[in-house]
Amino acid sequence: MNTRRVAIVGGNRIPFARSNGPYAHASDQDMLTATLDGLVERFGLEGVRLDEVVAGAVLKHSRDRDLTREAVLGSKLAPDTPAYDIQRACGTGLETVIAVANKIALGQIDVGIAGGVDTASDAPIAVNEDLRQVLLDLNRAKSLPSRARTLTRLRPGQVVPEVPQNSEPRTGLSMGEHTALMAKEWGVTRAEQDELAAQSHQRMAAAYERGFFGDLITPYLGLERDQNLRPDSSVEKLAKLKPVFGGADGTMTAGNSTPLSDGASSVLLASEEWAKERGLPILAYFADAQTAAVDHVHKGEGLLMAPAYALPKLLDRAGIGFGDVDLFEIHEAFAAQVAATLRAWRDPVFARERLSQDAPLGEIPSEKLNVNGGSLAAGHPFAATGGRIVASLAKALDERGSGRGVISICAAGGQGVVAILEK
Amino acid sequence: MLTTLKAALPGRGSGLPGDLLTREVTVDADHLADYAHLCGFTLRDELPPTYPHVLGHPLHMALLGKAPFSAVGVVHIANRIVQHRPLLLGEDLTITASVRGFEPHRRGKTFDFVTEARVRDELVWQGFATNLKRGAGDESVPKPPAFEPPPVTAQWRVADDLGRRYASVSGDRNPIHLHPITAKALGFPRAIAHGMWTKARCLASLRLPDAFAVEVRFKQPILLPSKVTFGEDGDRFAVHGHLEGELVKLAD
């Protein structure tokens, strides 16, 4: 089958905020709409009908059934721009890019926006499950006596609402607790986690300093930079923090884990012809993608280790190894998860027993890893992370002038999404 | 509500027209969020075009307090907004309000609250809120031009607590909006929606250019709760039976 090259034209996001901070009263729809409008302004798309907008959110209100379409209708894009939502936990953002890119590659569409948004502040709190059942039965009850009987099931405790949990439905463990298990299994030290965290902050601060994010971010509600970013972060300061996961002798702290965050991101993808006709730049090309999942439920595999399986598959298909990759973007849900993944890729036993490969992928040099900072510095509004990384990596490749970059994102449910960008 | 009210209030009994009251405002993002969501706007850095009216409300009340007549029976009958560009969250605004009038009307006399928003010396936004003080009318004043309302494009359910919710974000706590009992005491069968909420809800439904003038005439009040219909067609829009509106795009 003939496929076309998929151009990454550019991106836009709002600065990421810590939850219950400056975006506390902004809804997913507000943030996604503002993000789309920033992209519209940057690339002169006001009133333009695009072929598709695809976005998603991980924590979603029932009223946001068609979040992306509603955001499009509230944006400056032409109202007859089609849109849909998809969802794959923290892989949502990258998955939207894959969805748009695939249609462009197949010639089904010429241009689209991929995006994601999440708020941990304006969380979808639902009515108590017992109360919900009573209300549904009340609605089903046909006679007055049966309605009255249903109403006798109301209890004061049912006013306590259901709050979304950051835990795995089948293990009851939070993502942090799962990662603490991974850290233990792979022997990840506190020092290397703090090193990764400090480096993330320092590199992102440096990228801001040199204006790298100038055409990737639009200020929103008074915020101009990612609120979580601490340019003066250091290993010494991080070493003072108390562990929050893995018990008293745990190695994971609030400093080397991402905080709950609010934010949104978007990426403009197009065929080369579309970009050239409009005189728009091509930062990089979207080359290929792969997903994988682990069995964290029955086999006790590390919840966030799926990218360790996905990336080797992707590189095999491309016929390349680590030596052929210039930039690595590994989403930092936790420094411990990054460290565990890096260890798996250089572990001969993991290569042989889990990947059925003769040799491990090897070492990723620090100077190629998350060169403009990562989620530990920026924060991690779940579905917005993929778009942040794709736009940043595309721009970093454009700055280099040529090269290849890979993206690796771990997600809840034991899943992973990885992709290759090229210039 | 927002920041310091630096209104230099002249002494009592100075009458209405001629006074110019001023306040400096820095918009609070949380208040903006409450206002935007209640009226159906997306929360963004551009302020909703009806928002400066709310910023002018304390000044309108101060002006009305010095009027030579009772504020009871004053009805907001029309409202015109001219936006030269969107105002932005984070800009320091100077809000001024004055009264222009009086004009004869078939059912009394009208006066305008003229509200202006400036960023430094740049005039960015103007509002003209036309109020009717019922009284001896002048039948020779021509009726407003006939308005053919656009067909229905949407239906809104207007909740019974809307008046109280809008009162708390706008500061306009006129009892006719708050509760059926207080509204009845003033001659309405139930509480009624604020006219400026209705206008805001309309503008939130339209695709607006950056620079425009928009004029509405308020017809019958919306009784709370209600189900009402909205229609838009090019530069005209309506809440059928309640509001007639026209939009004019201005050169940027």
Image: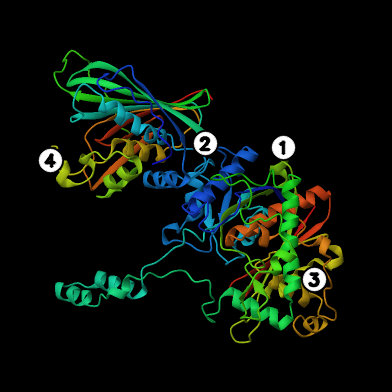
Task: For label 1, count other residues whose C-alpha is less than 10 Å away and answer few (under 14), some (14-19) or many (20+).
Answer: few
Q: Residue at x 82, y 76 (%)?
A: A346
Task: For label 2, count other residues whose C-alpha is less than 10 Å away and answer few (under 14), some (14-19) or many (20+).
Answer: some
Q: Quadrant of residue A302?
A: bottom right
Q: Amino acid at mark 4?
A: Ala
Label 2 to label 1: alpha-carbon separation:
30 Å
Q: Position of residue A85 (x, y in %)?
A: 53, 58
Does mark 3 fall on the same chain as mark 4? no
Q: Amino acid at mark 1?
A: Gly
Residue A119 left/right relative to A404:
left
Residue reaching furthest right?
Answer: A323
Give the camera-side residue of B223 and A254. Answer: A254
Label 4 to label 2: alpha-carbon separation:
41 Å
Q: Which mark is residue A118?
A: none
Q: Which residue is mark 1?
A: A279
Label 2 to label 3: alpha-carbon separation:
51 Å
* Above or below: residue A10 compared with residue B199: below
- Whether residue A94 can be seen here: yes
Mark nearest the camera among 1 and 4 is 4
Q: Secondary structure at mark 4?
A: helix
Q: Earlier in the sequence, mark 4 or mark 2?
A: 2
Does mark 2 fall on the same chain as mark 4? yes
Q: Which residue is mark 3?
A: A316
Q: Chain of mark 3?
A: A
**Pointer 1 with pointer 3, Cβ within 8 A:** no
Q: Residue at x 28, y 17 (%)?
A: B101
Q: Which mark is residue B88?
A: 2
- Whether residue A407 can be seen here: no
Does mark 3 fall on the same chain as mark 2? no
Q: Chain of mark 4?
A: B
Q: Secondary structure at mark 3?
A: helix
Q: Which residue is mark 4?
A: B185
